[in-house]
Image (cartoon, grey):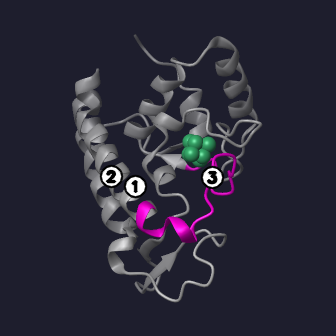
Amino acid sequence: MDTLFQNYDALIGRVNAQCEKIETALSEHMVCRKGCASCCLNISLFPVEALRLRMALDALGAEVRASVLASAVRSLDEGPCPLVDTDGACRLYGARPVICRTHGLPILFADEEGARRVDFCPENFKGVASLSGDAMIDLDALNQILTGVNAQFCEALFGGAPPFERISISEALQLELDA
Ligand code: SF4
């Protein structure tokens, strides 16, 4: 099964490295910390990320798993992420999706008119007049790579026709897995 996730895991490694580099360079302007879950919403995921997260759930203890599933059942789309613990920490931090790894960092993206914009957590970079291009995550490029990784994954696992295009984190956590 792990070979199915080889490309995804390689992408995670690259994203982690890039995020760490940016965080190190900008740490004095960032207030992100364990327990802050302002960015944590019940977002939608491609099959590759949904199944990676769902498989990670099985590694949690029975009590935590039951608590996560109870939160998942109650979750609303775009509401708070069901993986946020009572102390604000992520209960599957090591297996969190790609976008979660960029939380708080400067994100470069094209808006609906095609204009390039930068966004970041309003708690960060207060008083910073400008940010260099290599201190930003190019979200469109990242999404393009993730789309390709997901397509390869779906081809290998489902012969190209996945049972869903995207599902929310709460739906992913409730998936029944075949052995
Ligand atoms: S998976 Fe974890 S990091 Fe991502 S939104 Fe949920 S709680 Fe936050």
Q: Can you identify the residue that label 1 sits on? A: 20
The image quarter containing residue 128 is bottom right
For image coordinates 42% across by 31% down, the residue present is 52
- Asked whether 73 or 140 is in front, the reply is 140
Q: Which range is magenta?
A: 24-43
| Residue labelled 2 has its Cβ within 8 Å of some atom of ligand 1 | no
- Disc 1 + disc 2, Cβ < 8 Å: yes
Left or right of 10: which side holds 99? right
Q: Is residue 175 above or below residue 111?
A: above
Q: Which residue is mark 2?
A: 17
In 3D space, how far apart are the residues under numbered discs 1 and 2 (Cα atoms)? 5 Å
Residue drawn at x 63%, y 79% is 126
* Residue 170 pos. (x, y %): 62, 37
Considering the numbered disc 3 on the image, is that residue within a helix, a strand or a loop? Answer: loop
Question: Badge 3 is on which residue?
Answer: 33
- Circles 3, 1 touching at the beta carbon (< 8 Å): no
Which secondary structure, mark 2?
A: helix
